[in-house]
Image (tube, helix red, strand yellow):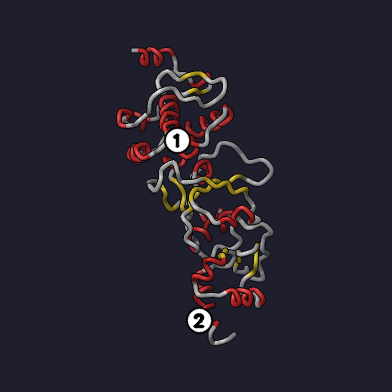
Amino acid sequence: MSHQRQPRLKPLLDKVPPGFLVDTRWLKAQGIDAKSIHDYVARGWLERIIRGVYRRPLPESVQAPTAVPWDSVLLSLQRIMEYEVHLGGLSALDLAGYAHYLHLGGAPRIHLYGDAPSWLKRLPSDAKIVMHRRTLFGDDRTGITDSDRDARESNQSVNVWRWPLMASSPERAILEALDELGDEAGFEKLDKIFESLTTLRPKQLMALLTVCRSVKVRRLFFVFADRHKHAWRKHLDADRVDFGSGPRALIKGGKLHPIYRIYVPADFIPEKEMRERADA
């Protein structure tokens, strides 16, 4: 190894744990040119996964998986390459322990929010990564936090750096999940999840509902919140939430909710006393 390569390679190995990824953009930002990248691959210090994406090899005693574990991908994006991306929606609720449906067969769907590199859709991962823009809350990062997941449950082959994933809190994640809602099956799935959301924090919910840009999401959230009557519901001030005007269509063949004026499955229409309150 030349005297010139040594100073550049050492910081690279210090920053990238075995099994984690970097891309050409990041490598060049570290002062590593295309010729050096090619040389590092030839010497086995990096391995090419796809064009423009490289992994620091795992120890010889560990067999590298054919598909890169999704959490290693996400941690590489977040903690090494510093892309603005987080785990959200149903995936963040799953991470927090609110999953009610076992995944049967095929690759799981992992929902990421933010700006990810174009190569992500070409990467051979053990999950189907679904990207979403952060339009629901704009630039507001309320509720994006380090997860407290147990690293022992990680899919990573080697846990050298026990970084936490940046993920939506349950308060933000349920609003992200509602934003994707569009059919009756989705209502049933979210209804089961919502039933278990007994410990949401009303202060954070109000902060998120205030900055949420979707009238549909704000209305749907209160449809579910009124339906399940968790203790935190009475601490939410619906008068501070902008519900927009006019009815909103959502699902074909749905019924118009008398309070929040959005079309939902018939089972989600309130009981008689709630209809009377809406007409009062």
Quadrant of res 280: top left
Disc 1/disc 2 C-alpha distance (Å): 51 Å
Q: Is residue 279 left or right of residue 165?
A: left
State whether residue 32 is above or below residue 177.
Answer: below
Q: Residue furthest bottom?
A: 3
Going 61% across and 77% down the picture, which residue do you hit? 35
Q: Position of residue 1 (x, y in %)?
A: 59, 85
Q: Position of residue 118 (x, y in %)?
A: 57, 55
Tag 2, which secondary structure? helix
State the residue position of label 1: 197
Q: Position of residue 214 (x, y in %)?
A: 42, 35
Q: Earlier in the sequence, mark 1 or mark 2?
A: 2
Tag 1, which secondary structure? loop
State the residue position of label 2: 7
Which residue is at the front of the view, 28 or 89?
28
* Number of numbered discs visible in the structure rendering: 2
Going 57% across and 23% down the picture, which residue do you hit? 252
Q: Nearer the viewer, mark 1 or mark 2?
A: 2
Q: Residues within 10 Å of mark 2 (few under 14, many from 20)?
A: few
Going 59% across and 49% down the picture, which residue do you hit? 129
What amino acid type should be assigned to the residue bearing mark 2?
A: Pro
